[in-house]
Image (tube, rainbow, N blue to C red):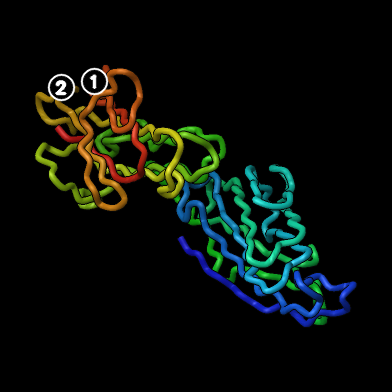
Amino acid sequence: MRRTHLSRALGVLGLVGAALFVGVGSASAGQPHWSMTVENLPPLAAAGSEAGFQVTINNAGPSNVSKLFLGTDTTVAPDYVTTTQGKCTAPGTRLSCTFGTVRKGTSVTVVAAFPTAADAAAFKAGFFATTSGASGSDKGHSSHGDTLRDPNEVATELIDSPDFAGGFSINGSPVSTDSVLSYSNVQSTTVDPPTGGVVTTAQDGLPDDAFSCTGCLGTLFGEWSSVDVAGGKVQNGLIKVILVVRADQIPYDDTPDDISLVHVLDDGTTQILDQRCAYGPSANCIDVKALYSGDFKITAYVTENGGFKGMG
């Protein structure tokens, strides 16, 4: 995930009555210095899912930016748009935002998610902020067509793999890796976020050393699954994680009552989840069931991201 900054001083102010940039105290106030960052939400998404971006424009002062707009190079219409100031076009239409005045010492943030093609390898929105409503309008470099971009904005990488699912979740729907288990696909992973408007991804098929398990005295089985909801930001609600593990991966003679779930947090801390959800979902409880096929279904309710693996 790359966050980069471009800071620039705006051109010389024209007549006070025509100027776009006006200082708080007087017309002679210094010209504003603004910067822009584009953050991918997430940097890697499943092809055909939503590619999300967070765009932040900051005005470091010492004066105000009195007219500011945001647009994109892509003609693909977003399915999701929010802004902390002003207004943006509705989802389903090409993105265009009008912020009005961005005062010195403040910033405006837009989050937008765009649909991607199932056969695409990458998606780039190409965001630009402008003081005139059109990119590159100040061809003579004489006044007020100032345009700002994040020069290091990168495309979201898109992957087509049965072991990876999700992207930016618009409505909070669960995402799942390939659910058809086989000799070459011994585990599926489902992640159900507590809310929409957040990154939600699941990945399994990871190697044994993908996570380090501290204090794991039992027999680990299946594959490591990696879960990301909202980039690790604290959520109001529980993240539901479901692992379905093929029968031949379960330790011999183990029953559902013998199974725990290892949860390695993003900071490396290991949790051994063995408390059952006797009275319904609660933080760090699990349910384990043997399916008709002999596969085991492990359902966990957690509050943090990380890696998950079964233990007998």
Q: With 110 as the anchor, is 44 left or right in this view?
A: left
Per the rendering, the mark at residue 290 is 1
Which numbered disc flags the more N-terminal residue, 1 or 2? 2
Q: Are marks 1 and 2 in contact (CB under 8 Å)?
A: yes
Instruction: Identify the amino acid type marked 2.
Output: Thr
Q: With 309 as the anchor, is 176 left or right in this view?
A: right
Residue 136 in sight from this viewpoint:
no
Q: Quadrant of the N terminus?
A: bottom left
Say which of 175 and 41 sits in front. 41
Instruction: Identify the amino acid type marked 1.
Output: Ala
Say above or below: 134 vs 117.
below
Residue 37 x %, y %: 57, 64
Q: Which residue is mark 2?
A: 255
Cα separation, mark 1 vs mark 2, equals 8 Å
Say which of 300 and 152 sits in front. 300
Quadrant location of residue 273?
top left
